[in-house]
Image: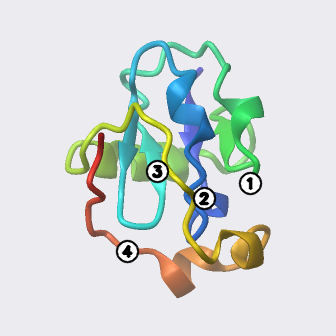
Amino acid sequence: MTYVVTDNCIACKFTDCVEVCPVDCFYEGENMLVINPDECIDCGVCEPECPADAIRPDTEPDMEKWVDFNRKFSVSWPVIITKKDQLPEAETRDGEVGKLEKYFSEAAGTGG
């Protein structure tokens, strides 16, 4: 099992999860985070830290696309280990449906 970040993170990018990760497997895009599923040790400490409920185990239905998505972007985005402020629109975008199609950016974040 591994954990992955889903579209609930897009346009929110809460980073509470990165400080509790014991293996630093989070990577930062311009408007979301991903987890490298090959580095994740399945400890699960990140999942309850996410205010947007964006971190899910890959054992849930239809998660294979998110495993592939997280793997793809974790190799090109920088690692993030330090908590940052969420995006300015996080409060209004939290829980919004269809964020992948509306807001997702492939651009890398700054990491850190």
Task: Classify residue 76 as left or right of residue 6.
Answer: left
Residue at the extreme front of the image, as rendered: 85
* Quarter where residue 99 is shown: bottom right
Circle 4 residues within 10 Å: few <14, some 14–19, many ≥20: some
Residue occupying the point 57% across, 21% down: 20
Distance between the Cα atoms at labels 1 and 4?
18 Å
The residue tagged 2 is: 9
Q: Position of residue 52 (x, y in %)?
A: 74, 54
Q: Residue placed at 30% from the left, 40% from the top?
A: 112
Cβ atoms under marks 2 and 3 closer than 8 Å? yes
Distance between mark 2 and mark 1 Cα atoms? 6 Å
Q: Which residue is mark 4?
A: 105
Q: Earlier in the sequence, mark 1 or mark 4?
A: 1
Query: Which class describes the residues within 10 Å of circle 2: few (<14), some (14-19), or many (20+)?
Result: many
Q: Answer yes or no: do the residues labelled 2 and 1 have beta carbons within 8 Å?
A: yes
As measured in the structure, the alpha-carbon distance from the residue carrying label 3 to the one carrying label 4 is 11 Å
Looking at numbered disc 4 in the image, what kind of residue is underneath it? Answer: Ser
Q: Which residue is mark 1?
A: 52
Do the CB atoms of the residues marked 4 and 2 lie less than 8 Å apart? no
Tell me which label, 2 or 3, sits earlier in the chain: 2
Spatial distance from mark 4 to mark 2, Cα to Cα?
12 Å
Q: Position of residue 95 (x, y in %)?
A: 79, 68
Label 2, label 3: how far apart the Cα atoms are: 7 Å
Q: Dot 3: within a 10 Å radius of its alpha carbon, few (fewer than 14), some, or many (20 or more) residues?
A: many
